[in-house]
Image (tube, rainbow, N blue to C red):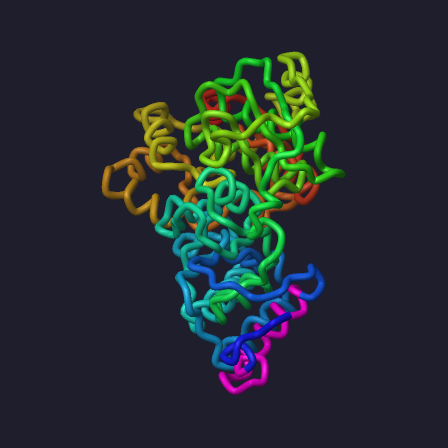
Amino acid sequence: MQLTSEEDEMLSGLQGWATQKAMQILVALGEIYGARRLIPVTSVQIAGVSYDNLGDAGLQFLSEMADGGGKVRVQTTLNPAGMDIENWQRLGIDPDFAEKQERVLEAFSRMGVTPTCTCTPYLAGNLPGFAEHIAWSESSAVCYANSVIGARTNREGGPSALASALTGLTPEYGFHLPENRYPTITFQVAAHLAETSEFGALGKVIGEHIQVSKAVPFIQGIPIATLEFIKSFCASLATYGGAALFQMQGITPEAAGIIPPVEQIRITQVELEAAMHSLSDGTEMEVDFVSLGCPHLSLQEIEHITRMLEGRQVKKEFWITTSRTIKKIADQLGYTQIIEAAGAKIAADTCCVVAPIRGRFTAMATDSAKACYYAASKHKFKTIILPFEEVVRQAL
């Protein structure tokens, strides 16, 4: 790789131990992927924040980077933590876990990272512009940033994203290069989609088609897609296909003017319903945990829940997960008070995927295809996927 004089200084240790370590990570990554140089980034989002995923080794690494003088050079936020930072007791989190999680966040804060723990940073103030180079980690956010915003990022690991934050740089390869962003396969959707759960099922269908080839899909046949629908789709496509970019005709900015790739696959209503069916192995009678917010909920979704819960009482454990930023607005609007009066719990900073809840529940109801995947694989829950309003009714 060709390094500038300042980059050489970083690599040689003249700008501190943590910066040197960060540059070593980026140079090694660049050499693996054949990058010719490093390029500046304007935004970073770091995954690997929950102590449930990091463990003691991850905590030690972060502490060493903070102790070594690491300081971020660009706007940097975090993925969800393993607990609500302010109200972890109410969610039944073990005090020992909470102490370790707080140490993780303290290490990030010492490095200047904004402790906004969310998988939807674009709804919480970390919003890059079209064609900006960034270094994001969370799979659904990477897919959203590349596709919906038109920013440029690969799916970074936690250490490489932190390295980018401490240097303001990333290797130029993958989706930072225009030639790698062009779609290579067309999906013609001949099905009606009107729920977040159905967009999640579509992400599963397309994801399973491209999980080996890692092709960039060009999607036709979606006339309308709200922010909430698209974030559900991004989460599922990334989970089931490892995808970091798609182009959707009439929806995403880079799709304009693209000639659809010759190779085409048609997705019918039958295939969509089969995907929905495959995401449910539990029954409504077994559900003892209800979760909405994977990815984190928008303010509009919280308002919708508030209207459904007002004056009523939930009968099951019901987590409504969102960013701290959105929750504070919900507090101001009175939504939080109504939701909590109904017995539900708004859990900021965390979600059902990264919280240490294995063994606590039998079956989970959700509208998220991504949540179904991790509830089964990580927590060993049965799952049932339902439309958004039906999930709320399950709690009632």
Residues shaded magenta? 9-30
| Main SS of residues in magenta | helix
Tell me the residue at 62%/12% (across/down): 269
Nearer to me, 21 or 291:
21
Residue sitting farthest toward the right: 212
**Position above or below: 137 against 64:** above
Residue 248 appears at what percent x and percent y?
Answer: 52, 29
Q: Is residue 162 visible?
A: no
Residue 58 appears at what percent x and percent y?
Answer: 62, 67
- Whether residue 259 sits left or right of residue 107 in the image: it is right
Nearer to me, 228 or 15:
15
Q: Is residue 346 visible?
A: yes
Q: Is residue 374 magenta?
A: no
**Position above or below: 348 against 61:** above
Which quadrant, please, contains the N terminus? bottom right
Nearer to me, 41 or 347:
41
Residue sitting farthest toward the bottom: 14
- Whether residue 320 sits left or right of residue 23 in the image: it is left
Tell me the residue at 63%/64% (across/down): 36
Q: Hey, which quadrant is residue 273 in on the image? A: top right
**Position above or below: 310 against 92:** above
**Position above or below: 210 against 58:** above
Tell me the residue at 56%/78% (across/down): 64
Tally of numbered discs: 0
Residue 203 appears at what percent x and percent y?
Answer: 60, 30
Tell me the residue at 72%/37% (across/down): 211
Which quadrant, please, contains the C terminus? top left
